[in-house]
Amino acid sequence: MKKYVLAGASFALLSVILGAFASHALKSIFEAEVLASFQTGIRYMMYHGLSLLIVSQIPMLQSKWIFRLFFWGVIFFSFSIFILCAGKLTPVDFSWMGPITPIGGGLLILGWILLIKNTIQSKQG
């Protein structure tokens, strides 16, 4: 349970920090399309941070696989978006990271499928 809370709270905290940074510092630097992508990464990180906090309180839903899929899904999905967006500000080409984003999204989807499956198979109310 501790790892759920720690990861969830860390993702939520980082979402707030990056959201404030995007709204103030990056708004004048990024083009609207890039800023929208960055905000998508922030939103998904917050959604899954909160989800991990909720799951931490429901013992029947705790699963090392749900945790792993959500955790690595956020890392691959959100952080690849952040790096791709930051790459717009540098001469470094990060386009090779583009395929990592949908892998992260796939991991998040699998995490939700597993959560639903575990809920259906649970013997609790």
Image: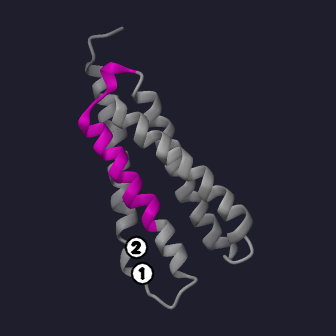
Which residue range is magenta in the image? 58-80
**Residue 115 or residue 76, whichever sits in front:** 76
Could you say whether the residue bearing mark 2 is in a helix, strand or loop?
loop
The residue singled out by tag 1 in the image is 95
The residue singled out by tag 2 in the image is 98
Question: In what quadrant of the picture does the C terminus appear?
Answer: top left
Which residue is drawn at the image coordinates 36% and 57% (left, top)?
Answer: 104
Could you say whether the residue bearing mark 1 is in a helix, strand or loop?
helix
Look at the picture and state if 99 lies above or below 54. Answer: below
Question: In what quadrant of the picture does the N terminus appear?
Answer: top left
**Is 84 left, or right, of 117 in this rendering?**
right
- Quick check: can you spot residue 37? yes
Image x and y of residue 16, in percent: 62, 50
Within the magenta stretch, is there residue 81?
A: no
Contact? badges 1 and 2 (CB < 8 Å): yes
Look at the picture and state if 91 lies above or below 76. Answer: below
